[in-house]
Amino acid sequence: MTVASTLTEKAFTERRKPEWEALDALTNEAQRRGIKKLEPDAVLRMSPLYRSVCADLAAAQAARYSAPLVDYLLGLTAAAHTVVYGPHARGREDGRKGRIRQAWLVAFPRAVRRFKREMLLAAALFFVPFALGCVLTLRDPSFAFRVVPEAMLRPLTEAYAKGFDAGREAGDGAFMAGFYVYNNVGIALRCFALGIFGGLGSAFYLVQNGLSIGAILGYVASQGAGENIVVFIVGHGSLELGAIVLAGGSGLSIGWSLVAPGELPRLVSLQRRAREILVVVAGAAVMLFMAAAIEAFWSGSSAPREVKVAVGGTLFVLVLAYVLFAGRTQDGDLEASGDDSPEEPS
Amino acid sequence: MSGARGPLDTDVAIETPEHIVFHYRVAGPARRALGHVLDLLLCYGGVAVLGVVVWLAASGGGLETEELQATAKGGFGLVLLALFAAQWVYFVVCEAYWGRSPGKMAVGLRVVTTSGRPIGWRAAALRNLLRAADLLPVAYLTGVVSMALSSRFQRLGDLIAGTMVIVPESARAARALELSPPAEPRELRDLPEHVVLDAEERGAIELFLRRRHSLGTARELELASVLARPIGDRLGYAHPNPSRLLALVYDRAVNAGRLEAPSSWHPRERTSSKKRRAGEARS
């Protein structure tokens, strides 16, 4: 048996300890304050120190130094590794703002178009039950009670029957905005997440929401307040219903990537698709935030109905045009899908 | 995936570009559940405090004027926003910035990618969006089943984001083992000049020597004799106290008779020390 090193452990430790402690101090500081806030020369020292401690670790392992020493060096290099290869070490300083703008103007609409099959299917899964619920309730108002509890429908109908001439108080608006964010954004995100069960969870949420919204619309209309509720919905409907469909379509998409992964292993296929589709989910959430603000402060306001319809219609055209045309190049959507993910799926 | 599976099933090995292999211990469901309960307490405790403040402000004002009533309602809208943040935003932001939520920090956990790197925004968002699926039908049942079936205790959110939750080893310097009391000439007389221990023997003796003070004397001698007999037989060395025998043998093997570094071991005199080492290796 050959001895790998002629240096005793004690001598090795004594000689190298200053560098270990320097790296330990730098790592702690970087973890506490973020690597961006370190002094320039501290950042410069970090990487050579890390590499030389890695070399020490290799030497200690080869020389079979005691387990605590090796463990100590492992812990030290592992902590430094998190800093050196951390998320802040990857992007350029100026990257973030540009990336967010790029996501909005290019990546989001492109991703929607790229997965248009799933988005169209989601739209069908939402709007067919919606129409069904609406028509069935108009023919027989009691159908609505099977979908939505009667205790919820009655006060709703009364509220719409009153109309919006009185407008809403400011406090009411703020309360409703909070409620819409909590409820609607939550539904959309859940609708996406449950897509992991082969898309079934998303499909269920889409159908259920479509049916009950359709039934509510039909019921309120059958009680004679149809014009009021349509005027109310039209203001924010394009954003709100559109976002639910997009979130549901994203859920269907990850579900499908699991069911039919093509040539990839199922897990890899799922991870890739989830990374690609995430921008659509984020976009849908932002759309719902906007919808919540409109719904709370504008849709229930005392503005004349002609104005509301006009604004709602314009918004609808804008949303549609944005999703269909934003970020297109002359060659279509082929180049740069906006997926510059630095974290490779493994 | 650059890592190979380790010898233990909670052990994940990851090789870095520097060809260093890290072993991470993957965190199990119990510890993660504890961390999660702490997070929930923090989140919903915060929301509850906000709710109470708004309620007190509303009822304390007497609600005489309509203006005040409206403000109170707006305040409850704020509580709902906070509830939304607790459900969907808290974990994403904490994990994207610090790699762990406060609850995970309290129980010593960290989220990393399966290749051992800190997670970014996308991974943090994905793994926490999928919470909605993991907590179904009740009490994270889906997540626990998924953890049981995956090799790295990953719930669905971890699988889709390519992450895992680990217990980072803390970097603490351990003192080198020293022979105390110092060897007496009588004890060293029969000890061979060169003692070679293989890695397993060395590891076992080291573990024993570090733990022996926490054992009772009887147990210490009993454990030591298990190791001391074969090693003593092989070296042809006997000592009445098996624990002392192990300490002596270990000291001889590790420190090879010199406890201090050679005087030439200073960075300034690197060339001369290299020559010296070459000479030693040959001899």
Image (spheres, grey):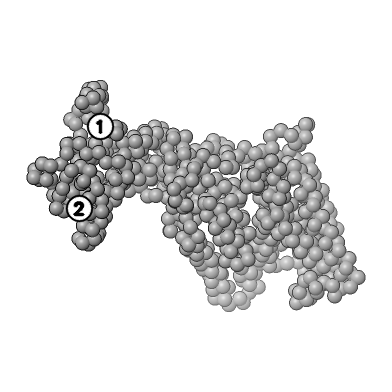
Query: Nearer the viewer's eye, disc 1 or disc 2?
Result: 2
At label 1, counting other C-alpha atoms closer than 10 Å, the crowd grade (few under 14, some 14-19, many 20 or more) is some
Q: Secondary structure at mark 1?
A: loop
Q: Residue B218: percent from the left, percent from the top?
A: 21, 61
Disc 2 sits on a residue from what chain?
Answer: B
Question: Residue A130: horizontal and vertical position, in percent?
Answer: 82, 62
Residue A163: in sight, yes or no? no
Q: Residue at x 34, y 36 (%)?
A: A62
Label 2 secondary element = helix
Which residue is depicted at the point 17% across and 39% down? B192
The quadrant where residue A325 appears? top right
Q: Position of residue A153 (x, y in %)?
A: 78, 73
- Picture quadrant where residue A167 is located: bottom right
Depth order, front residue of A11/A249: A11
Give neighbour class at mark 2: few <14, some 14-19, many 20+ (Cα, 10 Å).
many
CA distance separating discs 1 and 2: 27 Å
Q: Residue at x 71, y 33 (%)?
A: A335
Q: How many marks do you count on the picture?
A: 2
- Image point (43%, 43%), residue name: B22
- B114 relative to A145, above or below: above
Given residues B253 and A271, the one toward you in this image is B253
Q: Residue furthest left?
A: B186
Looking at the image, which is closer to me, A140 or B177?
B177
Name the mark on residue A6. 1
Query: Visible in this render: residue B271?
Result: yes
- Three-letter residue code for mark 1: Thr
Horizontally, is B174 left or right of B81 in the view?
left
Q: The residue under label 2 is which amino acid type?
A: Ser
Locate residue A8 relative to residue A56 in the image: left or right.
Answer: left
Q: Which mark is residue B243?
A: 2
Q: Is residue A118 left or right of residue B281?
A: right
